[in-house]
Image (cartoon, rainbow, N blue to C red):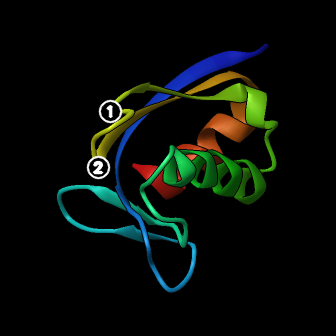
Amino acid sequence: MAENLIIKLKISPNASKNEIIKTDEMVKVKVTAQSIENKANKALVEFLSKNFKVPKSSIEIVKGETSKEKTILFKNISSDKMVEIKSVLS
């Protein structure tokens, strides 16, 4: 059964490498792309897609397009995948 999952995270553009960092308050995702012309958002979706092996079409930024704090929607993902994503991102 496919499910949806909403995750809040903070993006840090212009980083030296793409990575996920967990802090006490929030999950931070560093991307190498700059925050111009939507490049960081595209890089974020690409990185999450590769990292969790889900199609890019299943990942949508629902809030925070122009902000560092983003709300990400993972659409139509399996329960197993949901558990995996939650364990890393929340």
- Whether 68 is drawn above or below 71: the answer is below
Amino acid type at image mark 2: Lys
C-alpha gap between disc 2 and disc 1: 7 Å
x%, y% of residue 89? 46, 52
* Category of crowding for the residue at label 1, using alpha-carbon neighbours closer than 10 angstroms: few (below 14), some (14–19), many (at least 20): some
Residue that protrudes farthest toward the bottom in the picture: 16
Residue at x 70% of width, y 51% of height: 46
The answer to whether 55 appears left or right of 66 in the picture is right
Q: Which quadrant of the structure image shows residue 63?
A: top left
| Residue 64 numbered mark, or none | 1
Q: Secondary structure at mark 1?
A: loop
Instruction: State the residue position of label 2.
Output: 68
Residue at 57% x, 73% y is 18
Which x, y percent locates residue 85? 59, 46
Q: Is residue 49 above or below residue 15?
A: above
Answer above or below: position of 76 versus 34. above
- Give the amino acid at mark 1: Gly
Q: Give percent across and percent down for residue 9.
A: 35, 47
Tell me whether circle 2 and circle 1 mark residues in contact (CB < 8 Å): yes
Residue at 47% x, 64% y is: 34
32 sits left or right of 28 in the view: right
Left or right, 10 with respect to 52, comes to left
Secondary element under disc 2, as helix, strand or loop, is loop
Q: Residue at x 81, y 49 (%)?
A: 53
Where residue 13 sits, quadrant-wise, is bottom left
Quadrant location of the N terminus in the rendered image: top right
Dot 2, crowdedness within 10 Å: few (<14), some or many (≥20)?
Answer: some
Camera-nearest residue between 13 and 1: 13
